[in-house]
Amino acid sequence: MAGSTDTTSPDVPAADPVLRRIEHGVAWITLNRPEAGNAITAAMRDQVVVWLEEASADLAVRVVVLTGAGEKGFCTGADLRSQGSGLPRPPGAPDRAVGDAARLIRTGWQRLVSAVLDCEKPVIAAVNATAAGGGMHLALACDLVLAAEESKFIEVFIRRGIAPDAGGAYLLARLIGPQKAKELFFFGDDVPAVEAERLGLVNRVVPRHQLMAEAGAWADRLAKAPTRAISATKYLTNRALESDRTTALWDEATAQELVTGTEDCREGLAAFAERRPPEFKGW
């Protein structure tokens, strides 16, 4: 359910609900339903998953920036109105069988959050406004989080009488520890951007009018960095809290061997020896 919104604001048929452009090695993905707080439909969710998977394989993409249009929401969760009816049911079958809801969550928002975590390129969240429920977890799954001063984060699930999903307990407990995570989950209070930064949910808070410029500056730096080394670093860091020491050190050694075989590694070593700035290509 991903902290679903029940907004009744109409869609705008003329506008694509999610946008992508690729410029200078950066894939900009924008949730484009500002009138609905950028609540995500099933079609939007699936499209973002596809684009994240494509970014991993596309050598022209070296970083992804995920943001929302407008000033109402970064993402306010799932749009319940977009849920499909599913496969036809035989006579006498219930409207919802055991396993249906869990399957919907696994193949829906969990798949979206996993696509962010598994993307081989760094993903920056530029949180322009409210990130609620699944929208909050979508932001937290990103590798770096920039937030506008006006933005806020809300674990809205308790307000709906449901448990957190979209990977929320997994993400939040690792970011701020189980006790503080429970406080946010149990009370469902708004967390202003400055408090989110203090807690460690956000890397940096900036005025809204500077948000996209800041995201662009970070993205530009990452787009010029050794992409495969960053990919390996992302993998090792994401695995760190769930690996035992032996596994973590094995992964580290294997990643290091793979990365040292890249052209960027050879360029980095040559630039160091020649005392010049490196020019990384991304492979």
Image: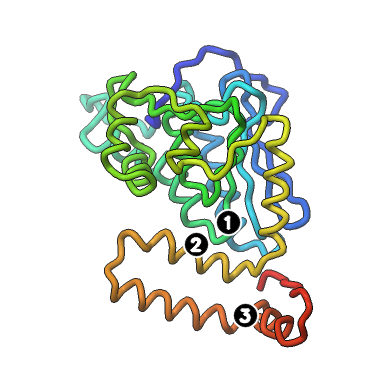
Q: Secondary structure at mark 1?
A: loop
Percent across and percent down for residue 125 are 58, 42
Q: Nearer the N terminus, badge 2 or badge 1?
A: 1
- Residue that badge 2 annotates: 234
Percent across and percent down for residue 167 are 36, 43
- Crowding at mark 1 (Cα within 10 Å: few <14, some 14-19, many 20+): many
> What's the residue at 31%, 73% (across, down)?
247
Residue kind at label 3, given as amino acid type = Thr
Left of 93 or right of it: where is 274?
A: right
Which label was assigned to residue 262?
A: 3
- Residue that badge 1 annotates: 122
Q: Nearer the N terminus, badge 1 or badge 3?
A: 1
> What's the residue at 45%, 17% (across, down)?
6
Tell me, yes or no, whether the two marked residues, 2 and 1, touch with CB atoms within 8 Å: yes
Q: Nearer the N terminus, badge 2 or badge 3?
A: 2
Q: How is the image coloured?
A: rainbow
